[in-house]
Image: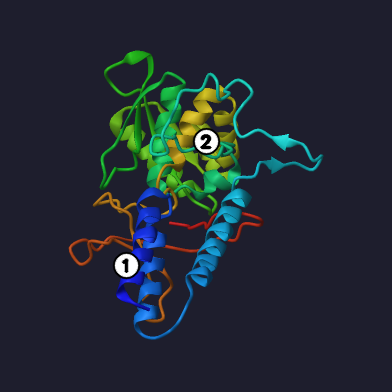
């Protein structure tokens, strides 16, 4: 085939390429076809156009299939837009400006969710709960808290009127921890105390708390208190509790998420990511929960 013929046919392909929506594909096909002629692989123009046409037909069929409306079980067509937002009253929005449709997630409070909260997130939840019931409070800073996690200020008083200890545990709370809270109450000259946990209390702890004006709130009671709030308040607490990583414990010194480690034949434990600068650790133990989507850790 002469150079003149190739150039004439090339002009035709070039015209199609610059005017059609498949200009890039047409151009690539033209270059391939030209190379076949130069290297003595004869291919007629008609054969080449047939291949090109078959390609475009297959592309159009794929596009038509992907743009079909969704048909439900009753063979009725579901519209892609709501009946209130039709093409006539909907403003034009480019593909880059179209909002992302978020999937609705159930914000239901369950015992599994409450048990899965790491210690710092559980303290934040308790503080937020007191705020929701209009009780002024202040959390203690990271580090040694002296047995106090939250100060309560009833009736907007300047001095704390009650102390709160929070424990995100899976084991039973014994009387020892209640005695420690009462000791801090005596030292601070505060008469009221709260001990809140994701777990429960043994009988000795219950009796000692009753004798020393300490209100015990176990996991079941805490869940009931949350569910007694308005739906809006429950949603606010849910978002606070579940934002980001809410199961990995926080280092009590550095305030960063810890890392699960295992050394030698020892059991797994949580270690600070700032090791060796920070050597804080927490004991980790998986607690089996039937049909639970979460991992539970006792620390």
State left or right for residue 93 relative to residue 107: left
> Tag 2 or tag 1, which sits nearer the N-term?
1
Q: CA distance from mark 1 to mark 2?
A: 91 Å
Residue at the spot 34% in from the left edge and 81% down from the top edge: 38
Query: Which residue is more in the foreground, 99 or 233?
Result: 99
What residue do we see at 55% from left, 66% from top? 50
Q: Nearer the viewer, residue 231 or 149?
A: 231
Q: Regarding mark 2 in the picture, which secondary structure is present there?
A: strand
- If the image is split into quadrants, where does the C terminus sit? bottom left
Which corner quadrant of the image does residue 188 belong to?
A: top left
Relative placement, left or right, of 216 versus 74 is left
Count of numbered badges drawn on the protein: 2
- The quadrant holding residue 228 is top right
Q: Horizontal placement of 19 versus 56: left or right?
A: left
Who is closer to the viewer here, 202 or 226?
A: 226
* Picture coordinates of residue 192, whole percent (x, y): 42, 27
Residue to which mark 1 is pinned = 7
Q: Is residue 152 above or below residue 271?
A: above
Q: Which residue is mark 2?
A: 216
Residue 115, x across and y down, in percent = 53, 48
Measured as percent of width and height from the top left, residue 112 is found at 58, 47
């Amino acid at each position: 085939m002469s150079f003149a013929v190739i150039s004439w046919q090339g002009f035709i392909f070039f015209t199609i390429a610059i005017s059609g929506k498949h200009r890039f594909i047409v151009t690539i096909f033209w270059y391939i076809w030209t190379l076949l002629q130069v290297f003595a692989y004869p291919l007629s123009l008609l054969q080449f156009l047939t291949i090109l046409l078959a390609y475009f037909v297959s592309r159009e069929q794929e596009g038509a299939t992907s743009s079909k409306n969704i048909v439900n079980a009753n063979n009725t067509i579901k519209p892609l837009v709501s009946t209130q937002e039709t093409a006539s009253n909907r403003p034009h929005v480019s593909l880059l400006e179209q909002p992302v449709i978020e999937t609705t997630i159930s914000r239901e409070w369950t015992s599994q969710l409450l048990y899965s909260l790491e210690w710092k997130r559980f303290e934040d939840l308790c503080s937020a709960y007191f705020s929701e019931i209009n009780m002024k409070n202040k959390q203690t800073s990271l580090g040694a808290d002296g047995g106090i996690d939250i100060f309560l200020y009833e009736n907007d008083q300047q001095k704390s009127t009650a102390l709160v200890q929070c424990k995100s545990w899976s084991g039973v709370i014994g009387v020892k921890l209640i005695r420690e809270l009462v000791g801090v109450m005596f030292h601070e000259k505060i008469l009221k105390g709260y001990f809140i946990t994701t777990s429960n209390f043994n009988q000795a702890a219950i009796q000692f708390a009753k004798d020393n004006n300490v209100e015990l709130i176990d996991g079941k009671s805490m869940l009931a208190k949350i569910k007694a709030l308005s739906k809006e308040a429950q949603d606010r607490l849910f978002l606070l509790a579940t934002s980001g990583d809410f199961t990995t414990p926080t280092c009590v010194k550095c305030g960063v998420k810890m890392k699960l480690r295992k050394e030698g034949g020892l059991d797994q434990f949580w270690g600070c990511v700032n090791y060796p600068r920070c050597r804080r650790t927490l004991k980790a133990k998986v607690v089996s929960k039937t049909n639970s989507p979460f991992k539970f850790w006792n620390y």
